[in-house]
Amino acid sequence: MQAQTAASDEETSGGATAQETDSVAVCSWFCVGDTVEYRMSSVAAEIVGNDTTVTESTRNEFMVCVTDSTKKGYELEYRLQDVFSSDTTSMRGIISLQKARLGIGQRVKVAISETGVIQRITNEKELYKKSLADMQQTVDRLYEQIPLLVGKISRQDMKKQLKEKLDTIFASHENLINQYYGLKLLFNNHGKIFPTGETEDDTDGYHITVSVTKGKLEDETDTTDDDYEIYYKLTEPEANGQQTNYYYDYTYFPDGWPRSVLVTILEKQGEKTLLTQMAINWLSKAWK
């Protein structure tokens, strides 16, 4: 994180005056060898009146390491270390969990700019080849465990459908980086500048409220006065009884590494509200 001061001249009848506004630029100050481990937990639920039903919960642990520095920025390595899911009985849940576990230890190489903006995944060909092999292995295991599946869809057709989905994912950078959503969330604010204090704006149909605070973070004893918390809420216009609110809460280490992320999405659908919440917290941090 880096504090900046922006000055603007304002013409008045009495002459020019300078008005200063503090702002916070989210940027990276990384070194080769810097490594942070994170745990990401997510939960999905339905809320009707006073009743809340959890429909899915997942948890994974991953590490991010700076492996190289370049003229244009850095190269990061993302590596999944562990994964857990509450859905281990449905076909969708079994496939998703088996696929995720096959990704444990896989090295995903990511190029970022000097400020920490994700540019692209650089070893996509290697990842595609492994993902295709993993998909075929997952389907074979599934048909061995559940022989009755052949009565619903043939093994060959399932592989064909899953390959089409895989091809779509690898067809664009955006689709591919979305597969590593925890990594995308961590660096979502890098390269942006936020004014301190609270601001409101209306952009692209959303009402946006942003609050930036400086100083020691609550319940954090190892922070300094250079730490920042960035909170913002996006509210889309209500239409036909439906409305979605997005809440984002970020905290950072002084060198720009994300400390924590909390995302809450509330989607109102008439009398029912769908809740999705994702939390990322650091487990360990090491640097050269």
Image (cartoon, rainbow, N blue to C red):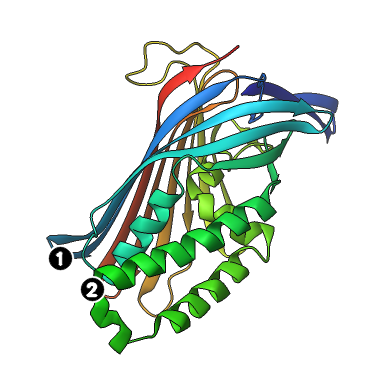
SS label for mark 2: loop
Most distant residue in the left direction: 50
The answer to whether residue 14 is above or below residue 132 is above
Query: Does the image show residue 45?
Result: yes
Q: Quadrant of residue 138?
A: bottom left
For the C terminus, the image quarter is top right
SS label for mark 1: loop
Amino acid carrying label 1: it is Gly
Residue wearing tag 1: 49
Q: Position of residue 55 (x, y in %)?
A: 23, 62
In the image, 260 versus 111, the foreground residue is 111
The answer to whether residue 19 is above or below residue 120 is above
Q: Position of residue 49 (x, y in %)?
A: 15, 65
Q: Which of disc 1 and disc 2 is earlier in sequence? A: 1
Q: Which mark is residue 271?
A: 2
Q: Is 201 on the left-hand or right-hand side of 193?
A: left
